Amino acid sequence: MTTRKLATLCREFKRDEGGNFAITFAFAAVAIFLSVGLAVDFSRSIGTKTRINNALDSATLATARALSIGEITRPQADAYLSALFAANIGVDNLADSKYSIDNITIDPVNQTVTASASYDQKLLFMQVGTDKSTQVVGSLSASSYGQSDIEISMVLDVTGSMGGSRISSLKAAAKLGVEELLKVNTDTDEHIRISLVPYSDSVNAGPLAKYVYPDYDESKSNAPVFSAQKFNDTGIGYEKDFLLDQYGECNWSGSCWFPSDYKIKNDGSSHDSCATDRKAPSSGKSYQYSDANPSKGMISRDSRLPKYGCTSSEIVLLSSDETKLKNAISGLSTGGCTAGHIGLQWAWYTISKEWADYVPAASKPGDMSTDDELSKYIILMTDGAFNTAYAGTNSSRVGCRKSSLSKTHTNALCNAVKGSNVKIFTIGFQTSNSAESLLAACASPDEGQITYHYEPDTASELKATYEAIANTIQSLRLIQ
């Protein structure tokens, strides 16, 4: 009897799984706790490392820039970088914090600034099962401060909406930008040159006007190619008969003439120095969204641009003459609609190696494919949506009426410019959302702490924007 009861009790104990579940749950809870703890500590480490990265990158870039323009000397660099890192990370005194600068190396031969920093982070959960209560989180950053060559084109909005206080704000801001950019130049070394491209509903090609031909009001155009020989012989780089064949009207006797609304002089030249957008041809290869030089096809001066609609503010080719550039900015005048893509188009020409043989020697653009130390930038500024285009439409009314078409041309040109390794900064001064979206898409993608699109709303913000862009261009890229 006793034996049977004992056997029954054993079978019941074997079937009872309540205790097994409790034990299993206990082990699982510990595993979950450790997993969550590890995730928390890891997340904190990543966040700390990001903060150190950003603070150290900014400090090394600023130190490189200060060395490059002579703001500090080599003996001052270590203290300068440490102070900047402390300010960026948000501590008053590094010595009293858990942050530290572990190493600073200034290499005068390779012209680099290298620094490493770390933080002694307390472990909240990872110390469970280990003998460690802290973990060192570190970062390494390096910047170059060599005097590489830079070519910049500043595209300036001089449309009617820029009148009054806005143009005054732009003049002050652009002059400051020129001053800051040219700081690195010396009497013996020229490292930075700047071109200016004012635009409204066209661009006054000024010194490059000989590469512009009078075009008619058509969506496409078979542009003549520029002939230096013809220009030297006649002052016009193409045959007048070429345009007559394209746009002339003839009667039964064979007599031909230009339409009365065609803006052309008797000798076949344009009435002014203005240029509109480059058009696609009716057949053959298109250079519409390219930096092709005039030997591939000259640039249009569409007859739908009024005879006296040309802005008086001419382009200024690449120059390091601060006085010349600032005087040109002072002389900017406003009027007309907004064809920003035409400004971008001509900015590209002024810094493109393709145009090197078509500009005066002093303004000849360099070739990035053979000069590793050369960088090129465009700064595109506007206060409103682009709304004027001539290429791609047969409409007789284009001024301020072709926002969609201008946007199409802008997007294509922005992509082509960036594809040629030219960086684009964009500035929307008191612009609408649609204009800001277009500019943001046109700008080069941000690179770490480097921002390429700005939206200033006040005169002081516009001034700060040009100064920030100048400082960014001078602050050489991170190399690690």
Image (cartoon, rainbow, N blue to C red):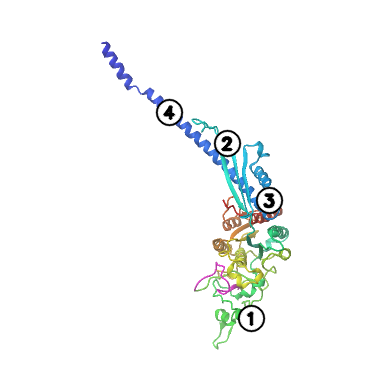
For residue 351, above or below residue 63: below
Residue 308 coordinates in the image, percent (x, y): 68, 72
Mark 3 or 1, nearer chain start: 3
Nearer the camera: disc 3 or disc 1: 3
Q: Which residues are magenta?
A: 284-301
Q: Quadrant of residue 440?
A: bottom right
Label tally: 4
In the image shown, does 154 or 164 lie closer to the viewer? 154
Q: Position of residue 425 (x, y in %)?
A: 61, 57
- Viewer-nearest residue: 162 or 136: 136
Name the spot of residue 144 as percent of width and height, x first: 61, 54
| Residue to which mark 3 is pinned | 74
Q: Which residue is mark 4?
A: 27
Which dot, 2 or 1, sits closer to the camera? 2
Mark 3: which amino acid?
Arg
Up-down relation of residue 235 to residue 137 (above or below): below
**C-alpha distance separating marks 2 and 4:** 29 Å
What is the chief secondary structure element of the magenta stretch?
A: loop
Q: Earlier in the sequence, mark 2 or mark 3?
A: 3
Q: Give the CA distance from mark 2 to mark 3.
A: 32 Å
Mark 4 or 1 closer to N-term?
4
The amino acid on which the numbered mark 4 sits, given as a three-letter code, is Phe
